[in-house]
Image: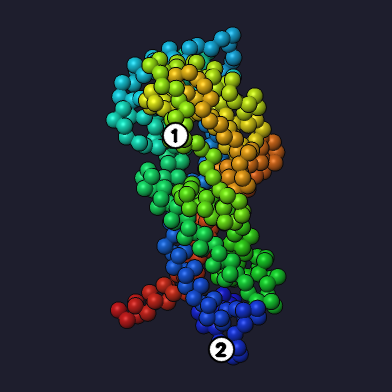
Amino acid sequence: MNTAPARDELSAPRRSKASWLRTPQRVFLRRALFQVHLWTGVALAAYAIVIGLTGSALVFETELNQTMHPALYHLTPGSHRVSLDATIGKIKTAHPGWFAFALRNFEDPTGATDLLMRPATGESTPNYRVVSFNPYNGEILLDRLRYAGVLGFLSNLHVYLLSGETGLLISGWMAVGLCLLCITGLILWWPGTQRWAAALLLKRRSSWLRLNWDLHTVIGFWTSAAFIVVILTGVDFAFPGPSGKVIELLTGAGYRDTGVSLDSIRRKMQRSDAPIMTIDQAVAAAKRALPQDAPAGYMSLPASPASPFRVTGYYKGAAPYSQLVRILLDSHTGALLASSSTREEDRGSRMEQYFVAVHFGLFGGDGVFGLLVKIVWVLLGLVPALLAFSGLTMYWTRKLRPLWRRMTLKG
């Protein structure tokens, strides 16, 4: 039985001077990194499995939702749309314990319009209510919480670990640990100049111990680049501020948020005793202010008379959330207060806008290439379970099983 992997890591002989190029297994730093890799992997194995499997399930989330709720995505356009204010007023009456904070997909000609609502208590929770209605007749098509159902549960688990913003921060730090795991794994993969080519391929006729070793090292090597990219984009979701500073350092360009601060536009708002515009009027004003190739997709409703309407338009043909325009409208007059386009931002800001599409495998578009990318991302999400299982198996066979046998014999 070939037990080369065990000898490499646990009992490398000292016959000559250690060399990172020729005999890296005997270099002290590599042995130290092996311990870091081992214990980081043990600590994060369960998290890696959960985050990978839930990520795989969410790659086709849109397609699964379209299958489960076809009425939301395949509406027959009518001759005219109902009043948004009247429809939203009815929804508010039916949900006295909730307040509306945003409107979504109100420019989609064949899809339902979504009203987003939070508890009237003011509780800030990512698990908001989504009320979808037909914009042509006002019919309520679906009323649910954001994280209801199987897909909602998986999304909540993947992003927030079922624990809201605290879970997102915990997940962010664990993702940093996974990045460390990938980097140390790449370093440990290097077998020396004489064996590096063989280390790129699986040996099908090996013993099961050797095959397990090869599965861990070879698959880990070939997927490491994609994993690091996916992990780093996930870290950005949890720590956007520090991540922005790192992007600025790497790109050599001044990083700035594409959002617009309320403090910078309050002075522009006209002091008026006039009532806040209706939502229908705000939608019309947004349509006039946004570029024709970037129709509105999201509108944040003003929380007070001193707050503006925030509207986001998404450029057609671009990867989801990758190219957009944000505008602020005076809530009394509809005047344009501020505008920001990702196409006019620096390199770092433009790059960051693609992180969602990259993280969830959405950058390939709607054609065959996009389908292939999603399939690859699904398979990529299964790899952490394979690496965790193979790594823990090696730890069991080399350390825990011999220890168990010794304890059994002594007993």
Left or right of residue 367: residue 7: left
Residue 180 can be seen, yes or no: yes
Q: Position of residue 392 (x, y in %)?
A: 47, 65
Badge 2, how many Cα within 10 Å: few under 14, some, many 20+? few
Q: Which colouring convention does the figure follow?
A: rainbow
* Residue 369 in the figure: left or right of residue 331: right
Rendering quarter of residue 150 = top left
Dot 1 corresponds to which residue? 262
Could you say where residue 31 lies in the image, as x and y percent from the top left?
51, 77
In this rendering, is residue 156 above or below 410?
A: above
From this viewpoint, which residue is outermost toward the bottom? 15
Q: Position of residue 203 (x, y in %)?
A: 66, 67
Q: Residue at image x 58%, y 42%? A: 353
Circle 2: element type: loop
Front position in the image: 277 or 96:
277
Q: Residues within 10 Å of mark 1 (few under 14, many from 20)?
A: few
Q: CA distance from mark 2 to mark 1?
A: 66 Å
Image point (57%, 56%), residue name:
249
Q: Nearer the viewer, residue 400 or 154?
A: 154
Q: Which residue is mark 2?
A: 14
